[in-house]
Image: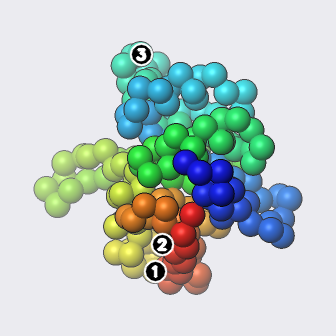
Amino acid sequence: MLDASVVRILDALWPPGLPARMAVFAIVDGARDERIYAAVRGTFLFKDCLYSGDLPWQLQMTAPYLIQLEREDRFSRFLIETGWGRSWATFVRTETGIKQLRRHLREFLRVCDESGRRLIFRYYDPRVLRVYLPTCRPAELDTFFGPVSAFITEGEYPGEILEFRNEHGKLASAARAS
């Protein structure tokens, strides 16, 4: 990815004037590429698996991970340079800490279909999130966003950056080129 595109994505995640108390996290989908798990394990950034319990190694390698990013960290740059456009991650802006955010995001990992069957909801996949959010009713948006100020993800088109916010029960979205 071109350096100018990387800088535009970084600027979208950390816009000028962002309050210091606002953190940026990535929900990284280990199932998207075999390089992800090694990169997650190798970073010194705060991280935690969204799945809980003693996981077999196969599930550890394909699980979703929550990582608190830093703008100048090499993992953040790797994630954007290598994973943007490949549906590796959805980004979150919030004022809450990693433990509280993990607890909130875990609430949505399992859903029930019309017949009551439990399913895994891969909302952290950008292809799923950008379709799901516009279908939400106001109360659903309030629940799903919770402490999250914004979800930022790649768009359907190459180089597109999408930002979703909950503004009093209405979905606000903005698209820009990377």
Q: Residue at x 42, y 49 (%)?
A: 87
Q: Secondary structure at mark 3?
A: helix
Amino acid type at image mark 1: Pro
Q: Which mark is residue 57?
A: 3
Amino acid type at image mark 2: Leu
Q: CA distance from mark 2 to mark 1?
A: 5 Å
What residue sits right under mark 1 in the picture? 138
Q: In the current view of this chain or complex, which residue is farthest to the top?
A: 57
Image marks 2 and 1: residues in contact by CB distance under 8 Å:
yes
Q: Earlier in the sequence, mark 3 or mark 1?
A: 3
Residue 164 in sight here: no
Q: Secondary structure at mark 1?
A: helix
Q: Is residue 144 above or below residue 3?
A: below
Q: Is residue 21 above or below residue 83?
A: below
Q: Residue at x 26, y 46 (%)?
A: 119
Q: Secondary structure at mark 2?
A: helix
> For the residues carrying marks 3 and 2, which lies nearer the camera in this image?
3
Q: CA distance from mark 3 to mark 2?
A: 34 Å
Q: Residue at x 52, y 40 (%)?
A: 82
Q: Is residue 96 above or below residue 67?
A: below
